[in-house]
Image: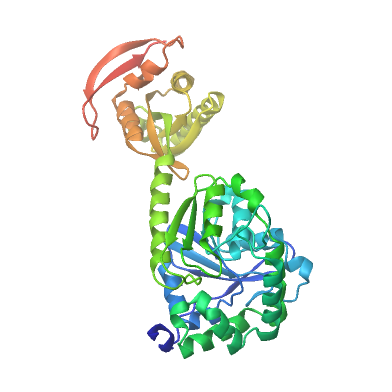
Amino acid sequence: MGTWEQWTEAEIPETNYAKTVDGVHIAYQVLGTGPIDLVLVGWLTNLEHIWRWPRGASFFRGLTGGTRLIMLDRRGTGASDHTIDAAQAMPLDARMDDIRAVMDAAGSERAVIFGVEDGFAVAALFAATYPERTAALMAFGATARVAWAPDYPDGRPWEEYREEIAEVERSWGTRVLAEAWIPYVFPDDIDDEAAIRFYASWMRGGGGPGDAASWYGVSWETDVREILPTIRVPTLVLHRVGDRAVPIANGRYIAEHIPGATLVELSGAAHGPPAGTDVAEAVRDFLIELRREEAELDRVLATVLFTDIVNSTAAGAAMGDRAWTELRGQHDRVVRANLARFRGREIKTMGDGFLATFDGPARGVRCAEAIATGVKPLGIEIRAGLHTGEVALDGDDVAGLGVTIGARVGAMAGASEVLVSQTVKDLVAGSGLTFEDAGEHELKGVPGRWHLYRVVG
């Protein structure tokens, strides 16, 4: 109860606006600075009003553990535009554009989309439509369909739902409806006067009685069951076992029909997510595992090529800055032309050399040979080293032990020499390339001794 009685003014994040392609202004807030973006998609909300609720503020802050939280008032609700007609406000694809516009405005290329209650439908559609922008999908207290059907017995009958819509239109934002709903949403607060008052105020902050009745009608018509099997992103479904507003059978259905989805059945009966810390804890655990898996999946097998101009410091001093800069430019053109020819990917230049990767070791070796031959008419020589191994993708860069080994092999090469690790030699068997033994060596910072080979044709 104390959480409702402690009415202190919470620090409210700045509210900004994103404009959708159909000209609707969507209010959004950004909280936290974690490495993962988390977009929270709910029902009727008002971003600034919700921060007056200490329990809600605590819940939202709890979600920022390791994330940058992005919250929005979807079109027709809260601080977003209400001056839109039903055709603009209702369709899932229009509401999906709310998410996309807010992500663009917040500089979020890819995010976890968290659909709470009715917000799950649009979150699921977004995940299925834009998997490249969806790191993961999460659901809380959600359903794929509200309406009962012979093939969906866990839905609600129309007669019951129609009576609820009528009650919403009569009593929205009043104490009467707050007292009727709070046993379902926050059963621990049924005798808390502050909780009841706030709950009625929350309704009014999200929209008027007509808005709420319209959204109820949309929920009745919505059915996302067909798209669940098409979702191909990591998915977490959270649902309370005692939820009376949306029984747990609905959450189980979602988890069963999204490939690879994880279902976490939470204790308790509260339909409102901020009741307790277990929701935020489950979210954090899921995101930690997601980051671990993504780090593993961001490792690929690649052939790494390092090149370097031999005696570049002395040559530059002898030639002077202007002449050396011009010669360096000619060298770079030779390297890049051969990278394009052999389908190499330039990662970066380092000093007087290049780091590049290839998806095939034979192409990497032939590219190194071509570069060594191509720069000789310029009066310079290069050394080159190659290794094939697992590398970690780090944006446009690569890292890891495979990269370190490639660098060490390159550093041991002589003028116009291409050295490779035994891994490269073994993988290009049958390519027509020939090698001679360059002996075993210790590579600085790399465990063990490494057998190297010199390319001779």
- Residue 139: give x, y in percent of width and height: 52, 59
- Residue 189: give x, y in percent of width and height: 45, 82
- Answer whether residue 110 is visible to the viewer in this image: no
Name the residue at 34% across, 27% down: 410
439 up-or-down from 210: above or below? above
Name the residue at 44% across, 73% down: 275
Q: Is residue 56 left or right of residue 257?
A: left
- Residue 4: give x, y in percent of width and height: 43, 85
Name the residue at 47% across, 89% down: 194
Quarter of the rendering occupied by the C terminus: top left
Specify the quadrant of the image occupied by residue 67. Answer: bottom left
| Viewer-side residue, 393 vs 228 | 228
Quarter of the rendering occupied by the N terminus: bottom left
Q: Is residue 33 left or right of residue 73?
A: left
| Viewer-side residue, 133 vs 366 | 133
Q: Is residue 420 left or right of residue 120?
A: left
| Viewer-side residue, 328 vs 362 | 362
- Answer whether residue 235 is visible to the viewer in this image: yes
Colouring scheme, one of rainbow, by chain, secondary structure, one colour: rainbow
